[in-house]
Image (cartoon, grey):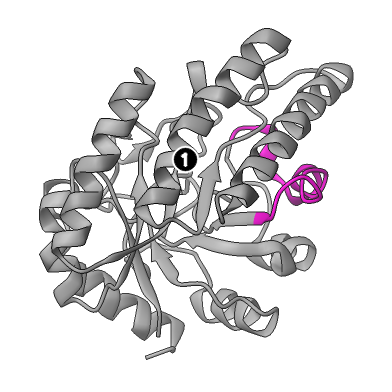
Amino acid sequence: MRLGFAITPATMDRAAEFKAAGINEAELCLFASRDSVEQALEDGGRVWDALTDADIDVWSTHLPTGGMWDICSLDEDMRRRNVQNLMHVMRAAAGWGSKIVVVHGLEGHGDDAHLQKIIDACRRSLDEMSTFAARCGMRVAVENMPRSPLEKSGEILKLMDCCAGLCFDVNHLLLQSHEEFLDDLEKYVITTHLSDYDAGRTSCNPKMAPGVLENDTIQFFSGKLGERHWKPGEEGGIVPWETVCRRLIKAGYRGPWMFEVSMKEYLYTAQEVVDSFLKCSRLG
């Protein structure tokens, strides 16, 4: 079974631990390396060195996000500059061995006319990035994102002809069930982000993301929260793991089961994450 883990500059010192838990592939995560191209390349190189030392292959690279990396800017000159910034990192990602690059798209909200402009800009960027990625032997995957136009499957479908497919983050669904989402998109999934969450339900689970627990009630925008990034099967988690995994396999998914679990403050060991996933998915 192919198991992977999203590894950042903050967790790269645990690469040997991931390897010992049966993790043979990684997503090299640069989503927080936002300040400059130079920072992203430096951070990526350091993570790649750590993965190489631990004999973990790079399956995917998560590109930086926001600001100078925004692919749906309505300022055309800025959009082109942002895509060029991403291509610098994509070229390095190919050297690190990445088969897939993961990108965020469709930031922001607005009326239908504004949203269509954002979609059009995003499509142009994905077309350009996909052409470049193919020359480098890679594919581009768009991630489903909460609190954005990419929160529901209908908008994501409008982008699937501009890239290779979807990075399915199972803890980002706030407005659709996993079953409904997969009805539309299961055949487009080419990589995953696996973790558990409670979709903003009231909870007193101590393993909350920092700063979101207030008087035992989750406080976030409309009262909903997505990115818990708990281990699969965590108490209070709602992801139907057996159904999700079964449907992806039946739809032809052959990539690694890539965990994107919060490893801050050593809440979990890598082995706990793997064992919990194998148990709740019944793949073990």
Residue type beneath disc 1: Arg
Extent of the magenta region: 147-165
Magenta-drawn stretch contains 105: no
Q: Position of residue 53 (x, y in %)?
A: 13, 61
Does 160 appear in magenta? yes
Most distant residue in the right direction? 113
Relative to 120, 4 lies left or right? left
User: Where 81 falls versus 91 (above or below)?
Assistant: above
Residue 123: give x, y in percent of width and height: 77, 34
Q: Residue at x 68, y 23 (%)?
A: 72
Instruction: Pick whichever, 231 or 137, lies toward us.
Output: 137
Q: Looking at the image, which is closer to me, 55 or 19?
A: 55
Q: Considering only vertical position in the picture, is 103 above or below 278?
A: above
Query: Which residue is rendered at x = 43% and y = 35% of the image?
Result: 89
How many numbered marks appear?
1
Q: Nearer the viewer, residue 81 or 168?
A: 81
Q: Name the quadrant containing residue 181.
A: bottom right
Q: Quadrant of residue 113?
A: top right
Q: Which residue is rendered at x = 25% and y = 67% of the image?
A: 56
Tell me if residue 143 can be seen. no
In the rendered image, the quadrant that contains the C terminus is bottom left
Residue at the extreme front: 135
Residue at disc 1, secondary structure: helix
Please name the residue shown 67% across and 44% down the image.
Answer: 130
Q: Is 22 drawn above or below residue 26 in the view shown?
A: below
Name the quadrant of the N terminus.
Answer: bottom left
Q: Quadrant of residue 222?
A: top right
Q: Position of residue 37 (x, y in %)?
A: 38, 23
Query: Which residue is denoted by mark 1 in the rendering?
Result: 91
Compared across the picture, whether 164 is left or right of 196 comes to: right
